[in-house]
Image (tube, grey):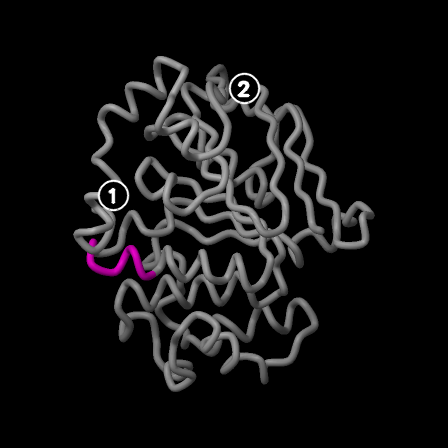
């Protein structure tokens, strides 16, 4: 079982404390939702886990399937990030094939895996020759998911992965992530401000407010019976998830 432990993580930008003493654990086969309003520190945590931002204090410990800590040089083989904006995260000058071939080569894998990678995210291998501008937003995000899987990632950080997609295709992308989590036994951190999808697609919810986790627990417990005043405020403002999913997807 792959485990990623976040221990006492903090980040200060100049004099602003963006993340304050945050701890949680990601494990294979489970999705943890990190929920909060814009500016609460969610994306800063994502970027620290992805090694794009250095923590001010605290540590991130990754343990592989063998129970041994993963060395720094192998960290990105195991941990990959799916960014919020599928339009900005793919280079418009390169083909889908290039976007997938690069991480495969960097991590010592064969480019012959490209057709299989596309099929894993429910895309036709024929799309490999296309460039991002020839794809829909949902297709671009599926390519970004395939790119995250290319190195053989065991931990996926999904930072608001559907917030910039059309309402009609958001549910399909979230269902894809859920399927991959089950089939690949992935550990997933799902970052969102949307409580309805957090409840529907995650096993555990962490609620962030002003850089701190103010409530945590099983999804239904936190979102149906919130204890913290801030969580109660979020839950009261959120649409009923059952109604939203009967209507065909999150808005």
Q: In this view, does 220 lie above or below 141?
A: above
Q: Is residue 170 magenta?
A: yes
Q: Mark 1 points at which residue?
A: 242
Mark 1 crowdedness (10 Å alpha carbons): few <14, some 14-19, many ≥20: few
Classify residue 225 as left or right of residue 116.
left
Residue 20 tag number: 2
Q: Distance between the residues labelled 1 and 2?
A: 34 Å
Q: Position of residue 122 (x, y in %)?
A: 40, 73
Q: Is residue 183 magenta?
A: no
Looking at the rendering, the stretch of residues picked out in magenta corresponds to 167-172
Classify residue 211 as left or right of residue 154.
left
Classify residue 195 as left or right of residue 204.
left
Which of marks 2 and 1 precedes in the sequence? 2
Looking at the magenta stretch, what is its main secondary structure?
helix
Could you tell me if the residues under marks 1 and 2 are in contact, i.e. CB atoms within 8 Å?
A: no
Q: Position of residue 125 (x, y in %)?
A: 42, 84
Q: Which of 61 and 89 is in front in this view?
A: 61
- Secondary-structure class at tag 1: helix
Residue 195 tag number: none
């Amino acid at each position: 079982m792959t485990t990623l432990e976040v221990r006492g993580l903090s980040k200060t930008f100049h004099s602003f404390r963006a993340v304050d003493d945050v701890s949680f654990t990601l494990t294979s086969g489970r999705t943890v939702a990190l929920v909060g309003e814009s500016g609460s520190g969610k994306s800063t945590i994502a970027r620290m886990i992805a090694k794009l931002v250095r923590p001010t204090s605290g540590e991130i410990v990754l343990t592989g399937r063998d129970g041994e800590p993963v060395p720094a040089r192998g960290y990105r083989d195991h941990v990959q990030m799916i960014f919020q904006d599928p339009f900005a995260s793919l280079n418009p000058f390169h083909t889908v094939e290039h976007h997938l071939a690069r991480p495969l080569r960097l991590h010592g894998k064969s480019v012959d895996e490209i057709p299989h990678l596309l099929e894993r995210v429910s895309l036709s291998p024929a799309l490999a020759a296309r460039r991002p501008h020839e794809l829909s937003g949902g297709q671009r995000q599926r390519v970004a998911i395939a790119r995250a899987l290319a190195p053989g990632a065991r931990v996926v950080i999904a930072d608001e992965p559907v917030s910039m997609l059309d309402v009609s295709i958001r549910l399909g992308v979230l269902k894809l992530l859920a399927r991959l989590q089950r089939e690949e036994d992935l550990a997933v951190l799902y970052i969102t401000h949307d409580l309805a999808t957090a409840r529907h697609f995650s096993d555990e919810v962490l609620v962030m407010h002003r850089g701190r986790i103010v409530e945590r627990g099983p999804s239904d417990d936190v979102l149906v019976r919130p204890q913290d005043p801030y969580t109660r405020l979020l839950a009261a403002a959120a649409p009923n998830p059952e109604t939203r999913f009967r209507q065909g997807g999150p808005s």
